[in-house]
Each structure stands twice: as structure tokens, then as C-alpha cells.
Amino acid sequence: MSRAAPFEVTVLTMFPEAFPGPLGVSLIGTAWREAGLWSLETLDIRGFSKDKRGFLDDTPAGGGPGQVMRADVIASALDSVERRGRPLLYMSARGRPLTQARVKDWAGGPGLIVLAGRFEGVDQRVLDARGFEEVSVGDAVLAGGEAAALVTIEACVRLVPGVLG
């Protein structure tokens, strides 16, 4: 079974240099670079800050400790991306667990848009307003969402027809 279009992945991140990482090697990397079975775009969300210093963080709107990524910056970054029916995933320790059944559903679709958060998280208002699904790759807190994004993307891409041969 072949796809009409490649499986498209867009990652919204403060650290685009973290990608492709392990996604760029082995059969998955070959399927991306040479066969075009899937595509990877990274979007540096720092470029969407209207603050003259480029700040991305603010105090949580409802109060609480730490800093969160600003809703306006995330919204602007997301608005620059064509959705094309792709689900919006936010990598979060408090999200629903990543399961093979969910991965299989996503892999059968057009791709993913993944938000890799930082700080204490992301302003909940933008997650709710835009319909992000919070996904957890395990019961642990990471410094950011990039490693979790890599896990989720690899789990999906390996199921794309032709990627693993």
C-alpha cells in the first residue's frame, strides 16, 4: 500500500537543531532523505516573539510557580503552518500516555504537528483554544519536549508503508 503524499511532520520548538537527531539515520533516515516517504519541518518558535528581546515565557495566567511559554507566540507559530488535517500534539508529562494504538491511528493519517514545550509548560489557553492533544511518553518530567517528540515521531514514521521495507 502506498501513500498519495508523504507523511508530513512539523515540529514547533525552541531548539530546531535537535532535529532530525536519530530520525535522520538508518532506514527511517533513508525513507526521509532519499525515498521521500515522510517529511520533517522544524519551526523555531523564537522567531514569532514580538518582544524586542525575543522572550517566549511569561507567568502562568491563572497563577502558579515558574514560567510558561506564551500563548500569543505559540498561536502565531501555529498560524504559520498549514494544518492539512494533521493532529496537534503537545508533549507533556501530564498528557495521555503514548500507546501503539494511538501511534497506528496517527501513522495512517497525513502527519503530525508537534509542539515541544519548555519551561514549566505552555500557557493552557492556547492548548485549549487550538485543540492540542497532550501526549506523554512516560511517567517522567523532561527538560523539554524535543526528546518526547522524537520518540513519538519515530513510533509513527516506522509504520508508514515502505519506511521499514
Image: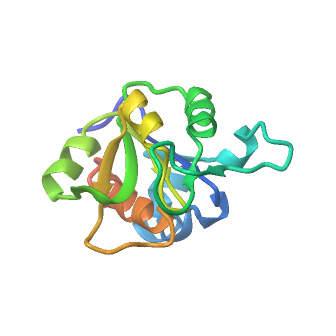
* Quarter-of-image position of residue 154: bottom left
Q: Nearer the viewer, residue 106 or 48?
A: 48
Residue at the outermost right position: 52
**In the image, residue 106 above or below residue 67:** above
**In the image, residue 119 above or below residue 141:** above
Q: Residue at x 45, y 55 (%)?
A: 31
Give the image location of residue 138, x and y in percent.
Answer: 26, 70
Q: Is residue 102 left or right of residue 157?
A: left
**In the image, residue 152 above or below residue 62:** below
Question: Can I make out residue 165 in this image?
Answer: no
Question: Can I make out residue 42 in this image?
Answer: yes
Q: Nearer the viewer, residue 26 or 107?
A: 107
What's the image's color scheme?
A: rainbow
Give the image location of residue 120, x and y in percent.
Answer: 49, 61
Q: Residue at x 23, y 51 (%)?
A: 103
Quadrant of the image containing the N terminus: top left
Residue at the outermost left position: 101
Give the image location of residue 71, x and y in percent.
Answer: 55, 38
Q: Nearer the viewer, residue 160 or 50?
A: 50
Please state the total of marks drawn on the protein image. 0
Give the image location of residue 22, x and y in percent.
Answer: 49, 71
Q: Residue at x 43, y 45 (%)?
A: 37
Q: Nearer the viewer, residue 126 or 85?
A: 126
Q: Residue at x 55, y 69 (%)?
A: 21
Quadrant of the image containing the C terminus: bottom left
